[in-house]
Image: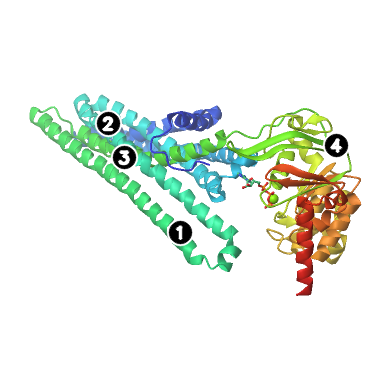
Amino acid sequence: MNDKPRSTANTNNRRGTFQLLSAYIYGDKALLSKATIFLLLATAADVFGPYLGKVFIDDYLMPRNFDTQALVILLCLYLVTQVAAAWLRYKQTMHFTTMALNAVQDIRQRAFKHVLNLPMAYFDHARTGQLVSRITNDTEAIKDLYVQFLSVVMSNLILLVGILIAMALLDLQLMLASALLIPTVVGVIFLYEKFSGPAVQHSRHLRSEINANVSESIAGMSVVQATNQQQRFIGKFDSVNDDYYRARMRTIKVSALLLRPAIDLLSVLVLVAIIWMFGLQVTTGVAEVGVLYAFLNYLGRFTEPLAEVTQRFNLYQQAMVAGDRVHTLIEESEQQYHNTPAQVSEGRLSVSQLNFAYQVDKPVLHDISFSLQPGELYAVVGHTGSGKSTLLSLLLNFYQGNPGAIQLDNQPLESFSHDNLRRGIGLIPQEPFIVAGTLRDNIDMGRGLPESELLRAAQQAHLSDTLAQLPEGLDTLLGEGGTRLSTGQRQQLVIARALAASPRILLLDEATANVDSETEQVIQRALKELHGQVTMIIVAHRLSTIKHADQILVLSHGRIEERGTHKELMGEEKGLYRSMYQLQQQAKRVEMLS
Ligand code: ATP
Ligand code: MG
């Protein structure tokens, strides 16, 4: 994942971000039009207040005309407009906030769903914390775009227009003097964009870096503490944290300098200009005090929206950068599956001339060919790094080799839909992954299988005895990572999970590498019982566990060096398998003697 800050904004991506975000603005037209109507009405009510003040001063106060009835009407009108303005503002804020929260909820859902459908290759480079940061913080920042920016900026711009109209009606010259502020503010915003853009981008990158650091340390806590790496991790965290502090300070400095103070200074200058021009009018005898009152009142409200708008540009900047990050994530292409009705019904598997490389110039598998009849058990052995796990990943379609090289029940692997493939092939990985929840959740994994099916799978995995000892049986809660089970039991649970959907093909990647010999025997027995019913490929380091395999494939540097039954391979005088086997037997004897 490219999470580096880009100094030059990628315009294509920015356009995509605009599309992504504006889709939500226009998405709910009814809500948008309601919000806008409330906004217009609120603005009209707001602008009307000072005008009523001007009427009071010029028509009643200055001529000392205290007509009670007219004054009561004026006062009531003033109160009504102000109360109405407050209520309308409330309605408008609620509508915009609803829009924002809907949008964020949807974007977050989309981003998460997308991540779950990304090809496995994506996760070779992705860092958990950074992904989490994109799905949580960045989508949250987008909310500000709607609530803070869109609503505030739109309402202020409309207020600005309303005030300009009211000012023009009162005095065109004074209005023009006030309007001078607008181009100046646009200039300030432009400068702000220019200076703060890269800084904001950098700071958001650092923030996701902080998340990545935290999540990595927590995920690897046992390793961190066991190897006494706390100081190093603290140091690394401190340095990113410091960088983040400095980057934030830079963005805050730019906004603190350019936004509010600049506008305040400019508005004082305009105020001086208006008072001076009004003074000129007084000397020529055309001035009305009420107009000055209304103007000063409007000017106060006029600079406020401008200041608000500029200040919100800060949030706009953050939201756009966050939007970019989410957009880049959403644009990552998902894993493509076909939607043919092909199903794995028998469990016949054939691989012919399969080649694969993770990186273009570093081939990992060369010219792999073998085929299994339904119910056969093949073992794959070989030194570390020889490509055993890679072969299993390809059979699961996590990565793709040359098209058509892998066939299931005489159909190319690519033609299977995601669902049918997962139902047809079960994987038992080396590291059992347990989700926080009950045993039932962990075996079922959301497939809604009947209880009898779950119990059958548990029995096949020889998990029934463990289950009987638990007071709540299938409904026993397991902690995150299955902390209430031993490693062996976790492995059995994962086997039960794979068996629960009655797959026709089962792939095991060193499923017994981490368990004691007693549990290993239990697992071996379970696998033996399945032999003949389910097609199995077992990757194993301990060669004594796969002696009964129908065929053993010996991988070396991504090629099949030898193949045959245990007996046949042991007959090869200088065979790789034979030497590996003998080495392991010797090691075992030495272990027993010592
Ligand atoms: P082990 O017995 O240690 O599990 P293995 O036979 O399963 O080893 P693989 O995991 O298949 O070996 O790796 C085969 C080669 O591919 C190795 O050289 C490894 O460095 C490389 N490799 C594995 N996964 C990736 C990946 N995601 N991206 C790039 N290279 C990879
Ligand atoms: Mg492996």
**Mark pair 2, 3: CA separation:** 20 Å
State which tag comes first along the sequence, 3 or 1.
3
Is residue 222 left or right of 267 when viewed as pictured?
right
**Mark pair 3, 1: CA separation:** 28 Å
State which tag comes first along the sequence, 2 or 1.
2
Q: Name the residue that disc number 1 marks.
A: 236
Crowdedness near tag 1: few (<14), some (14–19) or many (≥20) residues, C-alpha within 10 Å: some
Task: Name the kind of residue labelled 1 in the image.
Answer: Lys
Find residue 195 and name its label: 3
**Mark pair 3, 4: CA separation:** 63 Å
Quadrant of the rendered image containing residue 198 = top left
Residue 194 drawn at (x, y percent): 32, 36
Q: Name the residue that disc number 2 marks.
A: 182
User: Which quarter of the rendering shows the C terminus?
Assistant: bottom right
Mark 1 C-beta closer than 8 Å to ligand 1 = no
Please identify, in this view, whether the residue under mark 3 or under mark 1 is nearer the observer.
Answer: 1
Q: Name the residue that disc number 4 marks.
A: 348
Crowdedness near tag 2: few (<14), some (14–19) or many (≥20) residues, C-alpha within 10 Å: some
Please identify, in this view, whether the residue under mark 3 or under mark 4 is nearer the observer.
Answer: 4
**Mark pair 1, 4: CA separation:** 51 Å
Residue 349 drawn at (x, y percent): 82, 37
Quadrant of the rendered image containing residue 110 = top right
**Mark pair 2, 1: CA separation:** 46 Å
Is residue 180 left or right of 125 when viewed as pictured?
left
Where disc 1 sits, the SS reads helix
Task: Name the kind of residue labelled 3 in the image.
Answer: Phe
State which tag comes first along the sequence, 2 or 3.
2
State which tag comes first along the sequence, 4 or 2.
2
548 shown above or below 413: below
